[in-house]
Image (cartoon, grey):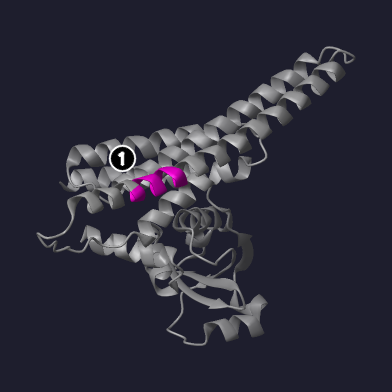
Amino acid sequence: MTDRINDIFIQARQGSVAAIIQVLNQQLATLDVRIRAIFSDGVLQLLCEAPQIEQLEQSNLVQQVKHILEDISPRNIRKVNINSRIVQEQQLLWLDEITRDPKDKLLWSQQITLNRPNIFKQIARHFQTSKPKPTPIYISKSVDHAQMEKQNQFQLGMMGGFFLSMLMLVLGIQVNKWLNFSRLDRISTTENTTLQSPDPTIKNSEDTIAESKEAFAQAVRLAQEAAADGKIAQSKEEWIAIASKWQEASQLMASVSPNYSRYDVAVNRAELYQKYSDIAKQEADKI
């Protein structure tokens, strides 16, 4: 079963729209959101459907879909157009329908651009998706063992050279960034010497916003962990732990300051995470 899931994920990473649909539907199952997709004119068109409008809350759903797609990092897909509507009967020409009359057929539509993974993730994913399965090699007793040893050394040397080149490239990038940061720090230090001490009220406001930003990010991390744990939980203790994570994530969202730019999202997430915590407790009570 695990191998089959991994195969679907690899197919999605290689750009298979059918596999992308399956991964999205699996990971959004807890929200009762159904996904359809078509790749057209260089853009992945997604249609998100659910029985109720509340399940299609734009900011939450867009962020989750973007996170899943960036985790997949499908080949040759950067632009994604996310459309939403109340669930309808099967329609093969849904893209033509919403293109003709988007205002009446859709709740909302938003286009996003997927971020590329960093160089280390690209290298790791390249080996995950392109590494061939080992095949048995039958060696004759007459093969020259010295020649085989030389070939092995040559292959090891090639691999070592490749990784050394990648390491030098990454080090070069980091050194360049460090030099630029050092120069900016010197300029900033020189400018700051001419400025007056900051207003304490402004500093307190900045500290509050920084704390809210950290609380928001920590809540998102806990929510992602709880969602992942919920896919494999079996025992009562596991469901109780998941409920605790959702509860903590809800409390962190509730602590976000109204001055924070994503305060409205935090209020929505606090209610949503509390709902998931209650659901996890119900699952624990069933066992």
Q: Is residue 72 left or right of residue 98?
A: left
Q: Nearer the viewer, residue 136 or 44?
A: 136
Q: Look at the image and say whether residue 159 sits in the magenta stretch.
A: yes
Residue 127 is situated, as x and y percent measured from the top left of the image, at 38, 54
Q: Residue furthest left?
A: 141
- SS of the residue at dot 1? helix
Asked where in the image residue 35 lies, by quadrant, the reply is bottom left
The magenta span reads 154-162
Residue at 59% x, 33% y: name it.
213
Q: Is residue 264 visible?
A: yes
Q: Amino acid at mark 1?
A: Ile
Residue 285 is situated, as x and y percent measured from the top left of the image, at 20, 44
Asked where in the image residue 237 lies, by quadrant, the reply is top left
Q: Is residue 151 left or right of residue 121?
A: left
Total number of numbered discs in the rendering: 1
Asked where in the image residue 143 lies, by quadrant, the reply is bottom left
Q: Nearer the viewer, residue 87 or 40?
A: 40
| The N terminus sits in image quarter | bottom left
**Mark 1, other Cα within 10 Å: few <14 / some 14–19 / many ≥20:** many
Residue 59 is situated, as x and y percent measured from the top left of the image, at 58, 54
Residue at 34% x, 51% y: name it.
155
What is the magenta segment's predominant secondary structure?
helix
Residue 157 in the image: above or below residue 115: above
Residue at 56% x, 53% y: name it.
116
Q: Is residue 44 left or right of residue 130?
A: right
Residue at 67% x, 33% y: name it.
177
Q: Is residue 255 visible?
A: no
Q: Residue furthest right?
A: 194
Q: Look at the image and say whether residue 251 sits in the magenta stretch.
A: no
Residue 141 in the image: above or below residue 186: below
Residue assigned mark 1: 242
